[in-house]
Image (cartoon, rainbow, N blue to C red):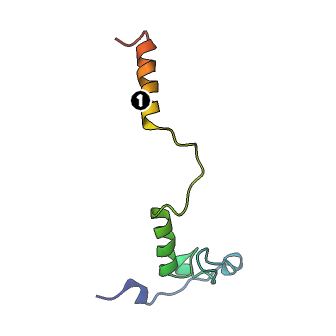
Amino acid sequence: MTDPDETPRTETPVPARLSAARCPVCGKETAARYRPFCSRRCADVDLSRWFGGGYVVAGHEQVDPEEIADAIAAGEATDPERP
């Protein structure tokens, strides 16, 4: 079985605005096949950072699950529509 990275492919022309792009992991010039990365390795490193919690998407402050359960219970107790 051959490695898919070693399979020859015809490269499509890269627009000038993209050819100067740099890999966000190592800073090398990007490769059309792995854009926005330069190689499969850098793409895997980036994915590993996401899985490992190295990147965080901005969001709301975390709330304790017990506080959520208490708020739901309080809402159910005061809701006149609920049996």
Q: Determine the residue located farthest toward the top in the rendered image.
A: 80
How many numbered marks appear? 1
Please tell me which residue is depicted at 55% across the width and 61% down the height of the picture: 55
Q: Residues within 10 Å of mark 1 (few under 14, many from 20)?
A: few
In front: 9, or 33? 33
Residue that numbered label 1 is attached to: 69
**Nearer to me, 61 or 11:** 61
Q: Check disc 1 and give the amino acid type.
A: Ala
Q: Is residue 58 above or below residue 81?
A: below
Q: Is residue 68 above or below residue 81?
A: below
Q: Which corner quadrant of the image does residue 37 belong to?
A: bottom right
**Residue drawn at the location 56% of the way across and 75% of the way down:** 35
Residue 18 seen in the current view: yes
Instruction: Examine the rendered structure and indicate whether residue 37 appears above or below residue 3.
Output: above
Residue 16: horizontal and vertical position, in percent?
71, 80
Q: Is 14 placed left or right of 71 in the picture? A: right
Residue 59 image position (x, y, % from top left): 58, 47
One can see residue 7 in this view = no
Q: Secondary structure at mark 1?
A: helix
Q: Specify the quadrant of the image occupied by residue 69.
A: top left
Q: State the image coordinates of residue 63 (x, y, percent, origin top left).
A: 50, 38
Question: In screen coordinates, is 28 left or right of 4?
Answer: right
Q: Check the picture and name the quadrant holding the C terminus.
A: top left
Q: Using the image as rendered, state which of residue 1 and residue 28 is in the foreground.
A: 28
Q: Where residue 75 sits in the image (x, y, percent)?
A: 45, 19
Instruction: Identify the residue at image location x=44%, y=19%.
Output: 74
Tell which residue pokes out farthest to the left in this image.
1
Note whether 33 is above or below 50 in the view shown. below
Instruction: Point out the image quarter for the N terminus.
Output: bottom left
